[in-house]
Image: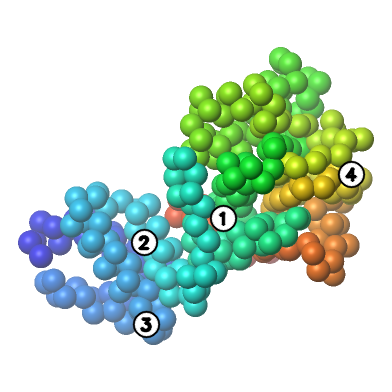
Amino acid sequence: MPPERLILLCGEFNKNLKQIEKSLKIKINQNGTEFDLSGKEDDVQIGVSALFELKLKLDNNVVITPDLVHLSLHSAKFNGEDVSSKDTPQIKTPRVVVSGRGKKQNEYLNNIKASDLTVGIGPSGTGKTFLAVACAVDDLLQEKIRKIVLVRPAVEAGEKLGFLPGDLSSKIDPYLRPLYDALHDMLGAERVNRLVERDIIEIAPLAYMRGRTLREAFIIMDEGQNTTIEQMKMFLTRLGFGSKAVVNGDLSQIDLPKSITSGLKHAIEVLKDVDSIKFTKFSAGDVVRHSLVQEIVEAYDNFN
């Protein structure tokens, strides 16, 4: 490898190597184009795989950034897991092909495919929303369902829908931005807008779900930790024939008053023995966003 490309691989002042060392708690000694990695065997193997993947990226003229190093480490960790091809579902949408990264994401996708009600629990950046939307789009395109319903409790920052400007759609839109972003990635903004206009993609404030029975629909609730017990029970009993629901949430991000029990937390305990309901619990190690996000999640998890 030419010296200038070696510098690009290692990073300025070896910052890429130092990032790998810090993440895996290993030691990397460089001698020209040779690298000697020392530490726990599994961690060393992940480091070797990450360096090899980064070299391939560099050979394809991809700029090596801290985020790319993080993603390469993440990919290397997952490649080392015992996940067979039959356990790795692929979802083809009009714009992207979606597949799980690692054991937990694959478990989550398989649970959604197999169950009428799936609960995803874990921190931001673990792919819960994106993967759920991918499954909904896939079912819609295969005509397994007639509509996608997006639900999210609006309690962030103490705001109430009645005090936000605009009509009902514009009021709830900001709270559903993560779901919209995923839909745009898979279908494109124009197609999503047409489907919303035709009510094939429906924006449904949680409070407006009462009294309804949703048939042949794929319902996604995001931020489920911010429901009350009554709201969660009401939502879970809206399922009609031919419908499927996914409830996502992060129990470390509850915005409810301290005197109110989270409906998601309560539902996990109440429904844990119902075989037909599937639960997937993600951890900080499953975060696939900016490397700093994983460090922040771990710091909060470890704070006493």
Of the residues under marks 1 and 4, which one precedes in the sequence?
1
Q: Secondary structure at mark 1?
A: loop
Residue to which mark 2 is pinned: 72
Which of discs 3 and 2 lies nearer the camera? The answer is 2
Measured as percent of width and height from the top left, residue 111 is found at 67, 62
Q: Residue at x 34, y 54 (%)?
A: 68
Q: Residue at x 84, y 31 (%)?
A: 208
Report the disc number at residue 126.
Answer: 1
- Amino acid type at mark 3: Gly
Query: Is residue 85 found left or right of 139 in the rendered image?
Result: left
Q: Quadrant of the C terminus?
A: bottom right
Q: Is residue 255 above or below residue 286?
A: above
Q: Residue at x 81, y 68 (%)?
A: 275
| Mark 4: few/some/many CA within 10 Å (<14, 14-19, 20+) | some
Residue to which mark 4 is pinned: 234
CB atoms of marks 3 and 2 within 8 Å:
no
Of the residues under marks 4 and 3, which one precedes in the sequence?
3
Report the disc number at residue 227.
Answer: none
Measured as percent of width and height from the top left, residue 8 is found at 19, 56
